Image (cartoon, helix red, strand yellow):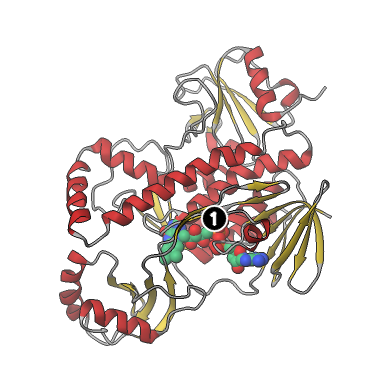
Amino acid sequence: MFDVIIAGCGPTGAMLAAELRLHDVRVLVLEKETEPASSVRIVSLHIRSLELMAMRGLLERLLPHGRRRPAAGFFAAIDKPVPEGLDSAYAYLLGIPQPVIVRLLEEHAIGLGARVRHGCAVTGLEQDGEGVTVELAGGERLRSRYLVGCDGARSTVRGLLGVGFPGEPSRADTLMGEMEVGVPQEEIAAVTAGIRETHRRFWLRPFGGGSYSVLVPAEGVGDRAEPPTLQEFRQALRAVAGTDFGVHSPRWVSRFGDATRLAERYRAGRVLLAGDAAHIHPPIGGQGLNLGVQDAFNLGWKLAAQVRGWAPETLLDTYEAERHPVAEEVLDNTRAQTELLSDEPGPRAVRRLLTELMDFNEVNRHLIEKIAAIGVRYDFGEGPDLLGRRLRDIDVEQGRLYDLLHRGRGLLLDRTGRLTAGGWSDRVDHLADPIAALDVPCVLLRPDGHVAWIGDDQRDLDAHLARWFGEPVG
Ligand SMILES: Cc1cc2nc3c(=O)[nH]c(=O)nc-3n(C[C@H](O)[C@H](O)[C@H](O)COP(=O)(O)OP(=O)(O)OC[C@H]3O[C@@H](n4cnc5c(N)ncnc54)[C@H](O)[C@@H]3O)c2cc1C
């Protein structure tokens, strides 16, 4: 009997497993594949995800494997400088191969005590008042108190629950891959420069080691379970560029669509959904993995609280209440970006207009912050603007704030030195510190770094500790 079974060891599942282990929850991750993914796709980790990694002491491990890039130009690929005033100590983008992220997160989870079984596909589930019975492809049955479907866009768990996944189907496929070319770089540059003016879903650029990264619109919408063939790449390149550049020797190839869908619910009893299992959208702006990892960060401590028995009654439901609207917004911004990448005259005119508007720093910053997910504000009720937002990493007497969050506990930042976490001190740390970077008396941070309370009154604080951390001990 496990406390939590997680279906899928992608970035979302691995992150969730690690978050649960911080609270000693017995976790089993079931991953269908026996081998790591062959696609070495480079993905962007945006500011909020970098912050999460810093909050758990993981950023230093990721940095050597990635390339830092300026936090600019990723809204609809509109090329602008880094906006002034980005409110983060990690105001950059980290380009890093997705398999590296998955491997590091999986190692982190295992290091904390999670069990991961590869080659185990979840095929069935049944839930009752006490738990969930999970069936594997070979007929083995396992039991846990909760199950989380982190099993990607075609989620078996979502399907078995019968949770609707409404939205728009894919209208256009794009082929992406890494391969060698048979013509000189100058010839490629001469042809591709003109195409990029009108075809925004196209590039052919050197990737290092003699290979090229290729992105090209596919002809028609295909079966995404099947990787495209080299022949399809050649055909698609000829259709767009009039030549296939002699592409050969692919290292990896993939196909993605622009379907946009959001699960109707994130929870059905003892079963929850997170990551691509809960939402899909085109990869414009590079947000999917970030959104999934951030789901896991929101869910982890709440599910742990439920398992450990100290969760207030409605805590677990705040996962959907907080994260569903965030996904809705991401879906919306990718719909908008898709339009802005269209080759039609109307959207191109709107793109020109937005390109002008983004010369205003406020506009540029707003759009970059949207994608970087540092503008998210959860609805915790009436209060100052900081309430419900994440607190950026700031200097404290002991060093950096985020270094104090590695254990995934709540944190009371007390500038008055008069307050106490009292009967919640087994779940909430207390830091009495004059903290120059804060302009409010005291702040209660949840384990995910969001501001749950601001004030200086102990009784009011106690009420909020109870709201987020349950009954006090003693
Ligand atoms: C071309 C492209 C570029 C992208 N670029 C970016 C980017 O720059 N930034 C970004 O944030 N996102 C990007 N994304 C999106 C990102 O790759 C996904 O959002 C991310 O992989 C979702 O993570 P996940 O863990 O939720 O799901 P997945 O990565 O799909 O992982 C799900 C896991 O579950 C396993 N599984 C499936 N079914 C079962 C089952 N029945 N039982 C057990 N295990 C199962 C799968 O094998 C897999 O390991 C891009 C996507 C594409 C296609």
Decide: is 470 above or below 95: above
Q: Which quarter of the figure is the C terminus placed in?
A: top right
Q: Residues within 10 Å of mark 1 (few under 14, many from 20)?
A: some
> Is 302 on the left-hand or right-hand side of 84?
right
Decide: is 97 above or below 292: below
Q: Where is residue 354 in the image (x, y as percent from the top left)?
A: 21, 46
Q: In which quarter of the image is residue 311?
A: top right
124 vs 372, nearest the viewer:
124
Decide: is 218 above or below 458: below
> Is 345 on the left-hand or right-hand side of 390?
left
Decide: is 220 above or below 112: below
Residue located at (46% from left, 22% from top): 436
Q: Mark 1 points at which residue?
A: 165
**Amino acid, disc 1:** Phe
Q: Position of residue 308 (x, y in %)?
A: 78, 39
Residue located at (54% from left, 55% from top): 165
Residue 216 can be seen in this image: yes
Q: Position of residue 332 (x, y in %)?
A: 39, 47
